[in-house]
Every structure is written in C-alpha cells, then in structure tokens.
Amino acid sequence: MPRNRRPQDRDEKLSEIVTAAARLFSEAGFEQTSMARIAQAANVTPNTIYWYVDDKDTLLVAALDHLLTDALQKFDQQVDAPLIDQVMWALEQLKRHHTLISVVHARSEQSTVVATWHDGFHALMDSLVADHLDKQGIREPDRTATARLTTFAVEGLLSHPTSVAETRAVLDLVLSRQERAAR
C-alpha cells in the first residue's frame, strides 16, 4: 500500500521541479538531462512533471526564469556601481550557467517558447543598460545602440569565456564612448 504523502501546494511542487531542472541542466547539460532524472531529483514520478509543464522546453524556460529571478534579486545591490561593474557582476552570476546559452540558441530555432524567452532576455538586458545610460544623460539613438551592443557582448562573452581582463576590455570598448560622453 502506498505511503500517504503530505498535501503539497502546487506552486511549491513546481518550484521543487524547476529548481532540480535548473541545477541538472546547468551541471549535466540540457540534452543529457532526462525528464526521469529531473523527476528523481525532485522526488516525483516522471509523469508528474507533465502535470506542471507541457514539455522539456517549457521546463527549460521555467528553469531559466528561476535562475534569472535569483540573479536579479541580487542585482539590486549593484545599482549604484558603475555600469561596467554592474555588467561584470552580471556576467559572473550568469557564467555558472553559460552552457545554457548555446542550448537557448539551438532550441530557439525549434521552440517558440524558448525563442520568446530569448527575445525577452534581450529586451530585459537592453532595458537595464538603457535605463542606466538614460540616468547618465545619454540620448537616443546612442542609448539604444549601446544597450544592444552590451547585450550582444554579454551573450558573446558567456558563449566564449575570456579572462577577467579581456572581458573588462571588451565591455570598456563597448561602454567607454558613451560614459565619456556623459562626463
């Protein structure tokens, strides 16, 4: 006879599944992580996962949202730092999950839900950088162009890891013209 389990809130169980998926996707890779392995890590049956998400891509997006939300909550401590330091900090946070960048790009071509998440990530990054540049008095179209270049640089630096010095040099090149103009 099955053991009685305590009733568990739907959001709480989904959070456990998403947390397990985020950890496994980051550690083992998306393709190498089966739904059965995620289920085992979340202490549910594989079919249970499908009560919460439609498919593995939807679970990937939930995991990415989980990781991004965690990073953004910590980002509040960085808002007074120079923009280059904020971006360097964000890169350090995201580097732990750099393998997911190539997964997002590959899956974006096949999955609408992943493509939509990717577009949203770009919009968020663009917005964070543009807001900072706006506070510095950078006007359009330079503000939007610099924000876009910074987002592309972040994505590229995550996909192609470089030393801290090289990373700072790339970001300085992208951001320095605008920050000097604001002075």
Image (cartoon, rainbow, N blue to C red):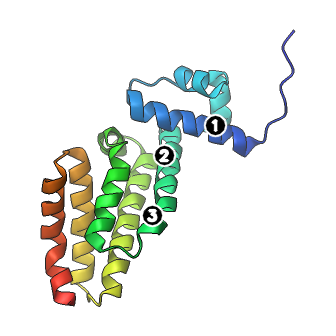
Asked whether residue 55 is in view, the answer is no
Tell me which amino acid carries mark 1.
Answer: Glu
Q: In which quarter of the image is residue 132?
A: bottom left
Q: Which quadrant is the N terminus positioned in?
A: top right
Return the disc, 1 or 3, that comes first in the chain's sequence.
1
Is 114 above or below relative to 42? Answer: below
Q: Which of marks 2 and 3 is in front?
A: 3
Per the model, the C-alpha gap separating discs 2 and 3 is: 20 Å
Q: Nearer the viewer, mark 1 or mark 3?
A: 3
Residue appearing at x 60%, y 38% in the figure: 53
Residue 116 or residue 100, whichever sits in front: 100
Residue receiving disc 1: 16
Residue appearing at x 29%, y 90% in the figure: 137
Q: Quadrant of residue 168?
A: bottom left
Residue appearing at x 36%, y 65% in the figure: 125
Asked whether residue 29 is in view, the answer is yes
Return the disc, 2 or 3, that comes first in the chain's sequence.
2
Residue receiving disc 2: 61
Alpha-carbon neighbours of circle 1 within 10 Å: few (<14), some, or many (≥20)?
some
Q: What element carries label 3?
A: helix
Residue receiving disc 3: 75
Per the model, the C-alpha gap separating discs 2 and 1 is: 15 Å
Is 116 above or below relative to 25? Answer: below
Q: Can you give x and y, in whole percent of width and height, for residue 96 in the image?
A: 36, 42
Per the model, the C-alpha gap separating discs 1 and 3 is: 23 Å
Q: Is mark 2 on a helix, strand or loop?
A: helix
Q: Can you give x and y, in whole percent of width and height, for residue 131 in the image?
A: 37, 79
Tell me which amino acid carries mark 3.
Answer: Phe
Alpha-carbon neighbours of circle 3 within 10 Å: few (<14), some, or many (≥20)?
some
Residue 132 or residue 17, whichever sits in front: 132
